[in-house]
């Protein structure tokens, strides 16, 4: 409970709700004392993915006006990530969010994507715009999905 509420006044119902949204409820329910379990300093008794889901639940509960997610799903398997993405999309509404990621599945729905190379912005736009206008952005997809750039460009032009 305290690992998610993190000093905020919250009901158990609120904490369970955000844990469910962050796909953390199931593994928390399997802990010896469920939501009252001690997980050690910095969550050492949890896997990397479990710690990330706790952090995401904490962010959901705090309901900030500005949300920064820095590789928030890097240690999570792709099936769990898909579920979390749905929840993250919902929390992004009506707030400014800065998403730092290497996962292409997370950036496709962003309003504005900045492509960085050696710390410099080399392109910006939304997913569709960047596929059409940025060779650097297209290269990321070509490499990740092992497709030919010509094939990707044909898909973009449809």
Image: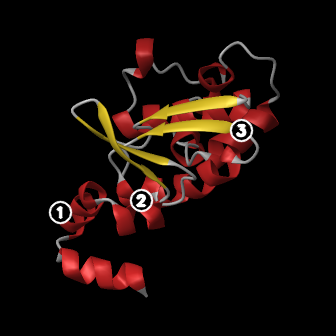
Relative placement, left or right, of 20 versus 26 is right
| Residue 66: % across, % down | 66, 29
Secondary element at image label 3 = loop
| Residue 115: % across, % down | 35, 45
Secondary element at image label 2 = helix
Tell me which numbered mark, 3 or 2, is placed earlier along the sequence: 3
Q: Please tell me how crowded label 2 is: few (under 14), some (14-19), or many (20+) other residues with Cα within 10 Å.
A: few
Q: In the figure, 44 relative to 94: above or below?
A: above
On the image, numbered disc 2 is attached to which residue? 105
Whether tag 3 and tag 1 are in contact, CB under 8 A, the answer is no
Nearer to us: label 1 or label 2? 1
Q: Please tell me how crowded label 3 is: few (under 14), some (14-19), or many (20+) other residues with Cα within 10 Å.
A: few
At horizontal 40% and vertical 60% (from top left) the residue drawn is: 130
Q: Quadrant of the N terminus?
A: top right
- Viewer can see residue 32: no
At horizontal 51% and vertical 43% (from top left) the residue drawn is: 27
Residue toward you, 139 or 10: 139
- Viewer can see residue 43: yes
* Residue 1 marker: none
Mark 3 to mark 1 CA distance (whole Å):
32 Å
Tell me which numbered mark, 3 or 1, is placed earlier along the sequence: 3
Q: Please tell me how crowded label 1 is: few (under 14), some (14-19), or many (20+) other residues with Cα within 10 Å.
A: few
Colouring scheme, one of rainbow, by chain, secondary structure, one colour: secondary structure
């Amino acid at each position: 409970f305290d690992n998610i509420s993190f000093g905020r006044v919250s009901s158990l119902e609120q904490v369970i709700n955000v844990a469910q949204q962050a796909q953390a409820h199931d593994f928390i329910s399997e802990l010896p004392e469920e939501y009252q379990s001690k997980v050690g300093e910095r969550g050492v008794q949890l896997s990397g993915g479990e710690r990330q889901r706790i952090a995401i639940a904490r962010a959901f509960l705090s309901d900030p006006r500005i949300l920064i997610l820095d590789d928030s799903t890097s240690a999570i398997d792709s099936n769990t990530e898909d579920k979390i993405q749905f929840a993250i999309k919902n929390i992004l509404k009506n707030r400014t969010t800065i998403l730092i990621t290497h996962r292409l599945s997370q950036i496709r729905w962003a309003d504005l994507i900045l492509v960085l190379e050696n710390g410099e912005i080399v392109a910006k736009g939304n997913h569709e715009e960047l596929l059409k206008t940025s060779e650097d952005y297209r290269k990321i997809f070509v490499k990740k999905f092992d497709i030919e750039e010509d094939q990707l460009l044909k898909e973009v032009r449809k």
